Image (cartoon, helix red, strand yellow):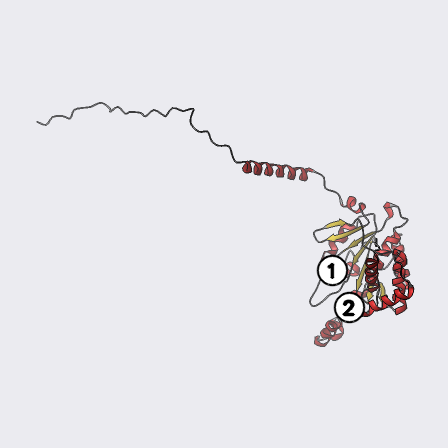
Amino acid sequence: MSKKPRKTGPRATSKTAPPKSSTAATKRPPPPDHDREERIARALEAIAAGLSAASPKASSADVLASADAFIWHPNGRLAPVPRVNRVDLGLLKGIDRLRDILIENTERFANGFPANNALLWGARGMGKSSLVKAAHASINVDRKPADRLKLIEIHREDIETLPALMTLLRPSPFHFIVFCDDLSFDGNDASYKSLKAVLEGGIEGRPDNVILYATSNRRHLLPRDMMENERSTAINPGEAVEEKVSLSDRFGLWLGFHRCSQDEYLAMVTGYCEHFGIKLGKAELEREALEWSTTRGSRSGRVAWQFTQELAGRLGVRIKT
């Protein structure tokens, strides 16, 4: 007979006792200093971001009251210009009639009366942009802060954002000159349509408290060869460039700047030297000024100013504009 298997009780399992903690065991090393500094930096950045979000932003009214001149950025920001780069109105020679016309137009506008948008076109370096900036300064000489005329420069490549700028300026109590220097259009550039709508053609049109001044070397803001090319290839040559040429027609005031004579050029140089205290004999001054203009191949206000800077530097005279 087979024997029954002997029953055995459960095998005793031996439990391994956990190792006793030893006072000699090494503790976890502290984090390196650079990790701690990085955490602190992140925490400070978070605090700063929170404070920035909680702080009230300056309103457009506060920004416009903070300065007399601004630069418009396409992201909707007006950057104040504490000190405008310009020359005194009395130093602009050879453009007396143009100066008087622009000053009168600007003063009427600043006083709340009807005035025209102005296109200053013509020869390079004859003081077109200088006249705009000088006229703005002269109008503000005796005005109270609440009545001061504001100058806003918009860059040529940002013309498409003009409607947004008009929306920002429309409710303001101030009057504004929106100024675009060296305005022109080439090729298939369609941004001129934004300017055209603001000048006259849009539903809202130009706000009553805004006037536009632009300078250009071209009377019609387009190169002649481009206009002739469009006429020659169009089905109706008369209408081919009408839309683009009509842009300049929307400036009610056209001021043409032409090359100055030798006498006008010398008068500019003399006026600069007298204003900045540059002393040189008349005969020698005129001889050097004419030689300078010959090397530049032209006579203009810009050339006269460049010669004045050269002469002042050579004679050790500091110029403060």
Left or right relative to 163: residue 131: right
Counting the numbered discs, the total is 2
Q: Position of residue 173 (x, y in %)?
A: 83, 47
Which residue type does callout 1 highlight?
Arg
Q: Nearer the viewer, residue 120 or 131?
A: 131
Q: Nearer the viewer, residue 75 or 242?
A: 75
- Secondary structure beneath dot 1 equals helix
Pointer 2 residue = 245
Name the N-terminal-most of marks 1 and 2: 1
Q: Position of residue 112 (x, y in %)?
A: 88, 52
Left or right relative to 281: residue 31: left
Which residue type does callout 2 highlight?
Val
Q: Nearer the viewer, residue 195 or 205?
A: 195
Q: Position of residue 238 (x, y in %)?
A: 76, 74
Can residue 17 be seen in this snapshot? Answer: yes
- Secondary structure beneath dot 2 equals helix
Pointer 1 residue = 156
| Front of the two marks 1 and 2 | 1
Q: Position of residue 62 (x, y in %)?
A: 78, 43
Which disc number belongs to residue 87? none
Relative to 227, is 98 above or below?
Answer: above
Question: Dividing the image into 4 quarters, which one contains the C terminus?
Answer: bottom right
Distance (Cα) linking label 1 and label 2? 17 Å
Left or right relative to 49: residue 132: right
Callout 1 environment at 10 Å: few (<14), some (14 to 19), or many (20+)? some
Callout 2 environment at 10 Å: few (<14), some (14 to 19), or many (20+)? some
Relative to 218, is 146 above or below?
Answer: above
Relative to 35, is 25 above or below?
Answer: above
